[in-house]
């Protein structure tokens, strides 16, 4: 009921604000119409083939995923190596044809694996399929309905446990597709690399995944790199009742920033309004959803334009002319909650606070860790400059713990993107493929620094509630999605690497 109420409220807000925006932009739209005829087909009543019953649960594949999930490959500085070596050993036994036919190496002898499926045509640039097998700490397991590392499938065919969504579910459908094609005697023309990471959830003490650097050193230019990120989802745009296959063509940057207040301290019996904790609290209070300006990134503009034919009549013209409406539309959408709103601006979240070491002493320092997701158009440097100006207090210092600018934008008008759309159609004929900006960070960003054709898409349907369990409690996935995901990879591999 709460989710339905939230969606209804969001639809009302977007409808009203975009409606006003459309009126404000009437002159610009009219000017465009004078130059060209704007044709927006009405697809609101269009019926695409239903995919709900096209795929059944593959019990053997589900069983292998459960075995993977039982191995607690928890990432972090205090993680032990044994679960990771156990997981890698399991892959050798679970996929004998991959073990026999694909070259396997460990770049820089680090926690990652690279499989090479040699193609017959050395002139064709290779395809890189990515996934990771580390998972985040489940936290207080008593908050879970069941032990996160004792996965199970309930009576409704839903898999429960840590890693089913992020990212062992995405990993297994790649391996299952390759193993099946090997069993069928398929020989790729284009070399296929399977790059698996073991420290994606944290850069780790030994740095980022070294595989992209290894490719650069070897002079290998991928035809396409495909990592996790997007998925098949219900439309986040109220007024559009469609399932979307959102393909990440870029991702926000990330900045972990330690913000520290410095003061003289003193005795708690004579408290000062300028104590470090008060100074820090005042600085934190200035960080709101309006801290950074809202703007419409090109992939989101393209997404909304492509969705215009499926929109309700009241929204159709506004979405079709979203490029004309520009900043006001970004402001309207940016004020909504959830993923759509966060796509429109750089976001700031205070995630950890510390200060003081005695109950009767005013600390000389107090600090907060900020998790900042940098929108396209901003950079690490510009974000820090903006925060300094916003807070405007010389007693506050900033320390970059980790920082990466947003990724470049991959094309949606090339053979690579077209191949993704075709593969989506084979597994999800009723989903509308659209580009988007990934809000979280992935190992794909390290590849995108070298090569342009990097995409992010996990070909499984995930509800908003399921996506909220990623890094949270009670992570779960519908078991039939594994079969659909495998079909996607079968289609993709045969189409882009086949004869």
Image: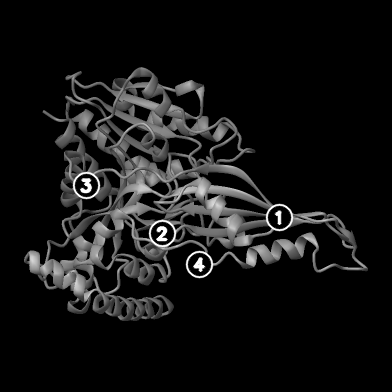
- Indicate which disc residue 55 carries: none
- Indicate which disc residue 412 carries: 3
- Mark 2 vs mark 3, foreground winner is 3
- Mark 2 vs mark 1, foreground winner is 1
Residue identified by numbered label 2: 467
Is the Cβ of the residue at disc 2 closer than 8 Å to that at disc 3? no
Along the polypeptide, which appears first: circle 2 or circle 3? 3
Is the Cβ of the residue at disc 2 closer than 8 Å to that at disc 4? no
Relative to 118, does residue 290 appear above or below in the rendering?
A: below
Give the CA separation, mark 2 to mark 3. Answer: 25 Å
Query: Where's residue 347, x and y in %?
Result: 49, 59
Q: Secondary structure at mark 2?
A: helix
Give the CA separation, mark 2 to mark 4. Answer: 22 Å
Give the CA separation, mark 3 to mark 4. Answer: 30 Å
Along the polypeptide, which appears first: circle 1 or circle 4? 4
- Indicate which disc residue 289 carries: 4
- Mark 2 vs mark 4, foreground winner is 4
Give the CA separation, mark 3 to mark 1. Answer: 45 Å
| Dot 3 alpha-carbon crowd within 10 angstroms: few under 14, some 14 to 19, many 20 or more | some
Q: Secondary structure at mark 1?
A: loop
Along the polypeptide, which appears first: circle 2 or circle 1? 1
**On the image, which quarter does residue 7 sit in?**
bottom left
Seen at 33% across and 78% down, the residue is 17
């Amino acid at each position: 009921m709460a989710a339905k109420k939230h969606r209804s409220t969001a639809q009302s807000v977007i409808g009203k604000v975009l409606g006003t925006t459309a009126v404000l932009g009437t002159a610009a739209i009219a000017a465009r119409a004078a130059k060209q005829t704007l044709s927006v087909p009405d697809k609101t009543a269009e019926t695409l083939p239903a995919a709900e019953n096209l795929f059944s649960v593959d019990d053997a594949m589900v069983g292998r995923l459960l075995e993977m999930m039982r191995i607690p490959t928890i990432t972090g500085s205090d993680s032990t190596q044994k679960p990771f070596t156990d997981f890698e050993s399991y892959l050798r036994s679970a996929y004998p044809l991959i073990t026999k036919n694909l070259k396997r190496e460990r770049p820089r002898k680090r926690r990652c694996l690279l499989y090479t499926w040699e193609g017959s045509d050395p002139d064709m640039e290779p395809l890189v399929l990515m996934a990771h097998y580390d998972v985040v700490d489940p936290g207080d397991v008593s908050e879970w309905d069941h032990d996160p590392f004792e996965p199970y499938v309930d009576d409704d065919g839903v898999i429960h446990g840590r890693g089913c969504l992020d990212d062992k579910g995405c990993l297994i459908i790649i391996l299952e597709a390759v193993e099946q094609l090997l069993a069928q005697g398929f020989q790729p023309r284009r070399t296929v690399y399977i790059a698996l990471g073991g420290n994606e959830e944290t850069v780790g003490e030994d740095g980022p995944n070294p595989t992209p650097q290894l490719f650069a050193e070897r002079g290998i230019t991928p035809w396409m790199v495909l990592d996790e990120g997007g998925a098949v989802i219900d439309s986040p745009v109220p007024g559009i009742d469609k399932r979307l296959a959102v393909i990440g063509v870029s991702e926000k940057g990330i900045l972990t920033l330690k913000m520290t207040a410095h003061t003289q301290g003193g005795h708690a019996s004579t408290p000062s309004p300028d104590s470090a904790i008060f100074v820090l609290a005042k600085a934190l209070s200035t960080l709101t959803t309006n801290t950074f300006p809202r703007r419409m990134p090109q992939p989101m503009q393209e997404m909304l334009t492509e969705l215009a034919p499926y929109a309700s009549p009241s929204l159709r013209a506004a979405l079709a002319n979203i490029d004309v409406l520009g900043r006001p539309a970004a402001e309207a959408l940016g004020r909504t909650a959830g993923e759509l709103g966060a796509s429109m601006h750089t976001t700031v979240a205070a995630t950890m606070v510390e200060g003081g070491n005695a109950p009767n002493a005013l600390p000389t320092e107090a600090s907060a860790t900020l998790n900042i997701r940098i929108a396209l158009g901003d950079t690490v440097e510009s974000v820090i400059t903006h925060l300094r100006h916003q807070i405007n207090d010389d007693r506050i210092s900033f320390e970059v713990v980790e920082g990466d600018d947003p990724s470049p934008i991959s094309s949606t008008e090339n053979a690579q993107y077209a191949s993704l759309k075709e593969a989506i159609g084979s597994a999800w004929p009723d989903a509308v493929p659209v580009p988007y900006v990934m809000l979280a960070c992935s190992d794909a960003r390290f590849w995108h620094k070298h090569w342009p054709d990097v995409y992010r898409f996990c070909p499984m349907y995930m509800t908003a509630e399921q996506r909220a369990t990623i890094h949270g409690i009670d992570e779960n996935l519908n078991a039939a999605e594994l079969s659909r995901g495998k079909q996607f990879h079968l289609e993709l591999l045969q189409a882009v690497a086949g004869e």
